[in-house]
Amino acid sequence: MTRYIIRRIASVIGVVWLMTVMVFGIVHLLPGSVAHMILGEFATADSIALLEQRLGLNDPLPMQYWRWFSGLLRGDFGNSLTMERPAGPILIEALGRSAILAGISLVLVAIIGIALGVHSAVNRGSSSDRALTLAQYAFISIPEFFWCIVVILVFAAWLGWLPATGYTPLAEAGVLGWARHLVLPVVTLTLGLIAHVSRMTRSSMLEALDSQYVLAARAKGLAERFVLYRHALPNALLPTITVLAIDMGLLIGGIVVVETVFAFPGLGRMLIYAIDNQDLPLMMGGMIVVTSVYALANLAADILYATLNPRIRYGGSAA
Amino acid sequence: MSAALALPRGRRLPRGLILGGFAIAVIVVLAVAGPWITPYDPDAFAIRERLQAPSLAHWFGTDDFGRDVFSRVLAGAHYSLLMGFGATAISLAIGVPLGMLAAFHRGWVDEAVMRGVDLMISIPPVLLGLLILATTQPSVAKTVISVGIVYVPIMTRLSRAVALGLLAEDFVDAARARGDGAVRILWREILPNAWPPIIVETSLRITFAILLGSALSFLGLGPQPPASEWGLMIAESRPFIEQAPWIALAPGICLCLLLVLINVVGEGLRDLLDPRMQGRGHG
């Protein structure tokens, strides 16, 4: 088990390192000079030379890479070109706000998704199961950016219950003001994922209910509640952990879109801002931060999976 | 060998598959014919008719430049199809041969391919797309290729797993005994038998490819204005969302409809081709 965790941590470090190579490589090896890209096509030769010198773009690429990478190791992400201040603190601040959004969404998705999935499986074929299946179909097919528009239209424009855009820190606005700005983004982020998770939980729960050990538990005369929650559910939840880890990737994609639409000052919006304004240090740093968070989340899911799964816990090797 | 795709005896095509397939065929025809059958020029400004509500003259209303939203939705349909089918075709074309070669050769080829796959899978899909699109001028082709590349690792992993299973079969041993080469065995023996699970996964991927592609366009990293890609149309409608919600609702509802239809067909294909899923409903 310890060995497995060490190996997984090593692979996380490897992935993040390879990502730094990829990000740097794509930004610097693509045709067209970086300075040209930043200054636009009408830049004068002088201004390009000046910028190239300022950014150290005339040095050999491995040296530039090492300068950037060793900076990252020290927590120095370079200076944002458009905001003229260190990119690191900007990114960390944005990451904190995105983490609030992602954390609340993930908890809601896990709780509601699993509860609905179990309900569907236990009441298989009932009218509520059929209604949920239909709803899952619909919700999986609706893109986040369209959801954003619909909820803004209904709850902000027509009903006027909630603010359409923006964010106020907890310390300034109090719990209510803070939460009011989170409701619509969280709703948009979670609907599709709840549909996905509940669907997967339903099918793994059905599989568990069909199994020999549930039959044995029932034959022993155990109470149905006990059979469901002690015997079937823990086994059904294992695949759900994997699904939640996969959904982290979708959640990150959703966050980029949702933050952009709701003008929520998080990491996703920062990334799009950096791309739109060709703020390379900010963009490269942002991508590394997002990859690291995603890799760590997957690591957490793997460890949780291994801890809960006796076959891995006692077997010593990873499945 | 090609009997794998034939209908098992006594089983009928699922109704959803027929209806969904028919509806998608209609959409494809409309999308291809789009540029010639739009009632108005989709890009023509008519400032005097701006922001008009849906009416008989303008079924889906007009946008902030007075352009006919119905014509624009029709003219933009091909982008979504291109992203869905084009990108998935790219990921199939790269992923399937790669996965099969890895399965056939094992050893260092397998190791190299699978480590590459692991790396790509540990990058969130949207980030991989952004990374490719961020540093170049956006265009339709680049979006399609980016989305295609994003899904290569999934196709590689799946076709490797399927091929590994098939390579243990007797008919592969027979082919080896005949002295057939790697390419011949993969092409003649493995591929025809590997299609069912790959087709099921492909139908799923098409939905995800359309979702990712239109999300990237929505963020401004796809076709550029005045293109009427549906995601882009929704993005451009945002300032007028209260005055003229139809500019966003028309392409949005069409997009959802297309995705639901593809999902229905995908489920139908899965019921038909994947014996493990049978009798489990939509589970």
Image (cartoon, coloured by chain):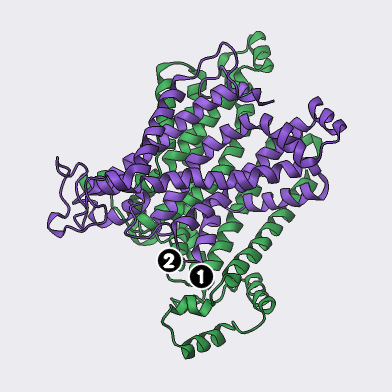
Chain colours: A green, B purple
Quadrant in which the C terminus of chain A is drawn: top right
- Look at 51% across and 76% down and name the residue there: A86
Question: Is A245 situated left or right of A264 in this image?
Answer: right
**Front position in the image: B121 or A88:** B121
**Front position in the image: A204 or B226:** B226
Q: Secondary structure at mark 2?
A: helix
- Look at 49% across and 59% down and name the residue there: A96
**Front position in the image: A282 or B102:** B102
Would you say the residues marked 1 and 2 are in contact, meaning their CB atoms lie under 8 Å apart? yes
- Look at 79% across and 26% down and name the residue there: B171
Image height of A40 relative to B283, above or below: below
Q: Give the mark count.
A: 2
**Label 2 is placed on what type of residue?**
Tyr
Determine which of the numbered discs, if any, sits on residue A282 in the image.
1
Q: Secondary structure at mark 1?
A: helix
**Front position in the image: A190 or B18:** B18
Image height of B90 relative to A174, above or below: above
Query: Callout 1 environment at 10 Å: few (<14), some (14 to 19), or many (20+)?
Result: many
Toward the left, the furthest residue is: B48
Residue B231 pos. (x, y %): 37, 50
**Label 1 is placed on what type of residue?**
Leu
Image height of B28 relative to A8, above or below: above
User: Same subunit under labels 1 and 2?
Assistant: yes
- Which residue in the structure is indicated by mark 2? A273
Quadrant in which the N terminus of chain A is drawn: top right
Image height of B148 relative to B196, above or below: below
> Disc 1 is attached to a residue of which chain?
A
Q: Is residue B169 visible?
A: no
